[in-house]
Amino acid sequence: MAPLAEDANLLSTSDPNNVRKWLAAHHPKQLSMLDKFEIELRLGRLSTSSTAAARTSSLGEVGMFGTTDRRLVTSRTVELLKSLIGSTRWRNAAQLLALLRGIGQELHAAGGFREPAIGNVVRRVMAAVREETLNEEPSDSTKKAAPTGADMESIDELEDNMGNMSLKRNTGVGGSASRSTKMSLTNMLWDHPQGIKRSSSGRHRSDSFSSMGSDSPLPSSETAGQFPPIYYANRPDLRQSVMEAIQEIMSDLEDLHKNINDQATSHIHAGEIILTYGRSKTVELFLKAAAAKKRKFQVVVCEGAPHFGGHAMANSLAEAGIDTTVINDSATFAIMARVNKVLLPSHAVLANGGLIAPSGSNMVALAAKNNSVPVVVVGGMFKLCPMYPHEGQDTLQDLVSPSAVIDLAEMGDKLVSEVEFVNPVHDYILPQNISLYITNIGAFQPSYIYRLLAEYYHSDDWESFE
């Protein structure tokens, strides 16, 4: 077994290859667990999203859309991270973040790009590690390494000199010292809570990845320069704190549907006609929860061709005693004038408040906007994705076989063979076409999504797996 110093050198970068070498050298059991998870992910056994449903439908198994809870892959990811964090011998927060980033890149390459909830969970755990690192008190080893009285005098003298230089620069010719105390854009950015760290010596701004130079007094590894010095402190109690944060994430996933369903009566009223598209486990349970509380309403379900998940959705709602009607997708605009509210499922919620939903949902949202019908999206916070739709309709898009649209036997026809068939899995819906997001922590407008992102993820981790 290699000594601890050698361990620290091995886990020096977040490159997936180096992370795998470190796991192979010191934690082969955890590496085997990661490989097994990636194999299941590549084979599509863990994917329960609309992508998996579309691929299943293209194989001829129509009607299976949305029959499995999407929390499966999310819960499995949390369990994997819990096992890796709890069983591996990382020494500080910097090594743990490098390990998590490497694992996140591995999962993203293995098929996590089709299931954005996987990357969202990894980012959430990384944000918890950062929060616990900044909140915890320094350990005894850190306190022993604190500056002496002579060092503090030198630091005070340096601060005085820097203060005098700053005062001269701010006052200038004919200026006033009071100008340095006025609010400015620089001060506002400096006081942003995400860039502040706390330590025993006071409150000061932590350096970001781009601002950390090679001359920073950090360990001599590739991760040096990525994190402030507090991330390299030895914190024996950090492991327990992170494990408690992961357990809290697992509890949120377990109570997700219950917390969403508790809001059903606040958004579904008696006598309403509600339109939904295809099949979604979350939307289905949300409607059933409202019906269980003696709310009488009607549901119109678009069949969701070519997967026809709406048929199974309507059958399930009818069995629960809800007045349900199935319509062709082409009849959506015609019936929209009679609808009071539209409920849509979500595949991912983007940083600008836009929505990635099953293919065909954008048509429903546009028809609702034309008739001034509110569009309400139901989904858990684990679908909150810190990315912007730079690619428009191609954002988080996946294309599957057109066999669900046209029989392959017909492709032998000369005229048909010259036609290009595109079978997209998702639609991107603009934030201005959405009225409200109902999540397990409350209801929010699309314009508030950016604030939720700041609370759930750290900005330095947004693009960790791209």
Image (spheres, grey):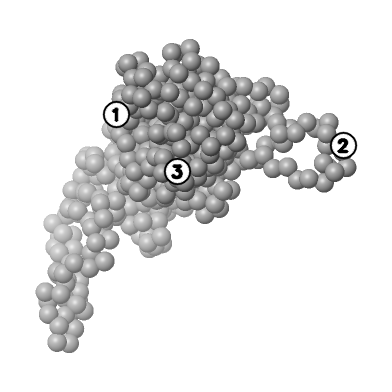
Pointer 1 local density, CA inside 10 Å: few below 14, some 14–19, many at least 20: few
**Mark 1 or 2, nearer chain start:** 1
Q: Residue at x 61, y 26 (%)?
A: 308
The answer for how far apart the CA atoms under marks 2 and 3 are is: 43 Å
1 vs 3, front mark:
3
Above-or-below relation of 420 to 336: below
137 vs 272, nearest the viewer:
272
Tell me, yes or no, whether the two marked residues, 1 and 2, touch with CB atoms within 8 Å: no
- Residue 72 in sight: no
Identify residue type, mark 3. Answer: Asn
In x, y percent, where is residue 375?
Answer: 42, 39
Which residue position holds label 2? 412
Element at badge 1?
helix
Which residue position holds label 1? 266
Residue 235 position by quadrant = top left
Q: With 363 as the anchor, is 252 left or right in this view?
A: left
In x, y percent, where is residue 456?
Answer: 34, 41
Residue 290 position by quadrant = top left
Which residue position holds label 3? 371
373 vs 356, nearest the viewer:
373
Residue 141 position by quadrant = top left
Tell me, yes or no, whether the two marked residues, 2 and 3, touch with CB atoms within 8 Å: no
Q: With 212 as the anchor, is 135 left or right in this view?
A: left
1 vs 2, front mark:
1
2 vs 3, front mark:
3
94 vs 250, nearest the viewer:
250
**Mark 1 or 3, nearer chain start:** 1
- Residue 433 in sight: yes
Tell me, yes or no, whether the two marked residues, 1 and 3, touch with CB atoms within 8 Å: no
Q: Residue at x 24, y 39 (%)?
A: 136
**Mark 2 or 3, nearer chain start:** 3
